[in-house]
């Protein structure tokens, strides 16, 4: 079992998925797909609502009748009780001071209407993983998603 597969299983358990229901992981394929090159190939194939330049604001927030929204976080160590924070602090090293959530830079997360790209949360927190531990005083992921649902409802989407 590779480290990436172990990490995938760890995030499943941290998300509350029972051990008997953990999905099979293919860590190598995930690493290839999520690499800079893999993400660039994906974005070239599916460019809808992407900014035209790095760290820019997307010009189109609606493409072919589909509304695009995004939000992301910046920060890795958000709770000393969260074991994943230390891993994401290590994976943030290649970003060399650029704001990131430990796996994706804030600039790379922009798609469609950018709600916010500076929540004090790491990549796993944005999906409420690892026992729901987040930075003290920061919005909880569930409330962020509720706000998004209300935004869509109010826009009649």
Image: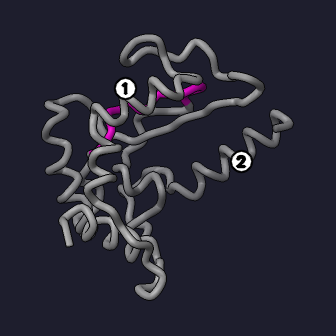
Query: Residue 68 appears at what percent x and percent y?
Result: 63, 31
Residue 74 coordinates in the image, percent (x, y): 33, 40
Query: Regarding mark 2 in the picture, which secondary structure is present there?
Result: helix
Give the side of residue 155 with respect to residue 25, left or right: right
Which stretch is magenta?
Answer: 103-114
Quarter of the image for the N terminus: give it: bottom left
Secondary structure type for disc 1: helix
**Residue at x-position 18% and y-position 59%:** 86
Query: Residue visible at 23% across and 28% down?
Result: 98
78 shown above or below 75: below
2 is higher (above) or lower (below) than 77: below
Who is closer to the viewer here, 145 or 38?
38
Q: Is residue 108 left or right of residue 86?
A: right
User: What residue is shown with label 1?
Assistant: 107
Q: Which residue is mark 2?
A: 149
Mark 2 or mark 1, earlier in chain: 1
Query: Any magenta on residue 84?
Result: no
Position of 17 relative to 50 (above/below): below
> Which part of the image, by quadrant, shows the C terminus?
top right
User: In the rendered view, does 46 fall on the left or right side of 67?
Assistant: left
């Amino acid at each position: 079992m590779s480290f990436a597969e172990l990490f995938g299983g760890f995030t499943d358990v941290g998300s509350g998925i029972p051990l008997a229901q953990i999905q099979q992981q293919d860590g190598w394929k995930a690493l290839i797909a999520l690499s800079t090159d893999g993400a660039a190939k994906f974005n070239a194939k599916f460019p809808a609502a992407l900014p035209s330049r790095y760290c820019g604001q997307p010009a189109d927030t609606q493409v072919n009748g589909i509304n695009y929204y995004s939000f992301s976080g910046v920060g890795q160590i958000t709770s000393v009780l969260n074991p994943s924070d230390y891993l994401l602090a290590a994976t943030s090293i290649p970003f060399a001071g650029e704001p990131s959530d430990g796996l994706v830079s804030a600039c790379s997360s922009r798609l469609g209407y950018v709600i916010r790209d500076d929540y004090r949360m790491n990549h796993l927190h944005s999906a409420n993983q690892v026992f729901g531990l987040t930075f003290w005083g920061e919005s909880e992921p569930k409330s962020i998603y509720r706000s998004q649902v209300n935004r869509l409802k109010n826009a009649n989407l």
